[in-house]
Amino acid sequence: MTPKLLVSRRLPEAVMAALALRFAVTVRPATAPMSEAEAIAALADFDAVVPTLGDGFTAAAFAAVQRPRCRILANFGAGFNHLAVEAARAAGVAVTNTPGAVTEATADIALLLILMATRRASEGEAWVRSGTWPGWEPMQLLGLQIGGKTLGIVGMGNIGRAVARRAHHGFAMRVAFFNRSRVPDPGVPSEQVDSLPALMAASDVVVVAVPGGPATRHLIDAAALAAMRPHACLVNVARGDVVDEAALIDALEGGRIAGAGLDVYEREPEVPERLRRLRNVSLLPHLGTATLEARTAMGMVCVANLVAHLEGRPLPNPV
């Protein structure tokens, strides 16, 4: 019998075609995250599920299904803090993700946000769109030139290294980083800093690129932000709750840091009005992997994980 697969949100056509070769595929018509009730039904009714950001596979969902039919969650995405991984393991459900496929596109967005935040691009665009821009003058919207400045990276994994390569080779930035373990070969000339406050204090731009989850929730808190210099900018391409959003808003409103660039939010898709009102922050709608190439590559990693599971082989990307 062909195994039943649920895809929580439609994926690129090449991925859907590859899945259809091995599975009886059902695609949810909705684009919003799966509710906990939908997750419970999926665990009971399908042999495999491809979930993605925000889908409700909570510990309570697993507790509600004593013997889940589903044996694998092949997550579409590198981040998996929306999945109760330990509860899944206890229920005999494997969990995989797509770490390598997201690296380059996400690093591109980090560089975009670095430039937007330091050169006040969002503020300038809003001024032009308002129809009130009076024209060029010498002291208008002066920002920070990043060439030769210090980039601090929080989390020197695949994405952190890709950001470092772009910053070092493209802009001659000095690279420093904070990581929970030693990184013997970060790929570019750089300095590993022993504490987060020291990194924040030494950097002109800080990029957050750590995994989400309880261990990193509010890692960038009021104390970390207070260590930054007034001209410095913060960029987050990790998970929204890695940054204490309220503390960041306070720092931006108070002029304690110069700006920020955000692609993720603590209660996504909710973006606080106080944050939306600020002129010194650039806000993107979670565009990190939003290229056809990246999303197709992510989907093909899901396919590889699912097929390996189906054939009883070791999973390429277990979490």
Image: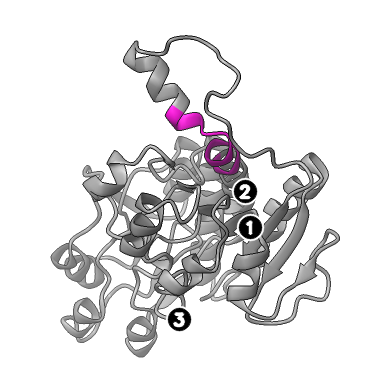
Q: Is residue 289 left or right of residue 277?
A: right
**Are the residues tagged 2 and 1 within 8 Å (C-beta)?**
yes
Q: Which residue is mark 1?
A: 159
Q: Residue at 33% across / 78% down in the picture?
A: 84
**Are the residues tagged 3 and 2 within 8 Å (C-beta)?**
no
Q: Which residue is mark 3?
A: 215
| Neighbours of disc 1 within 10 Å: few (<14), some (14-19), many (20+) | many
List x then y, in percent, for residue 106.
57, 48
Q: Which residues are magenta?
A: 113-123
List x then y, in percent, for residue 202.
68, 64
Q: How is the image coloured?
A: one colour
Question: Does the segment drawn in magenta span residue 121?
Answer: yes
- The span from disc 2 to disc 1 (Cα, nearest Å) is 6 Å
Up-down relation of residue 11 to residue 190 (above or below): above
Q: How many marks?
A: 3
List x then y, in percent, for residue 231.
57, 50
- Label 2 secondary element: helix
Q: Is residue 38 left or right of residue 269?
A: left
| Neighbours of disc 3 within 10 Å: few (<14), some (14-19), many (20+) | few
Q: Counting residues from the N terminus, which is met first, the one under dot 2 or under dot 1?
A: 2
- The span from disc 3 to disc 2 (Cα, nearest Å) is 22 Å
Q: Is residue 155 visible?
A: no
Q: Counting residues from the N terminus, which is met first, the one under dot 3 or under dot 2?
A: 2
Up-down relation of residue 113 to residue 131 (above or below): below
Q: Which residue is mark 2?
A: 107
Number of the label disc, if any, that sits on residue 117: none
Quadrant containing the N terminus in the rendered view: bottom left
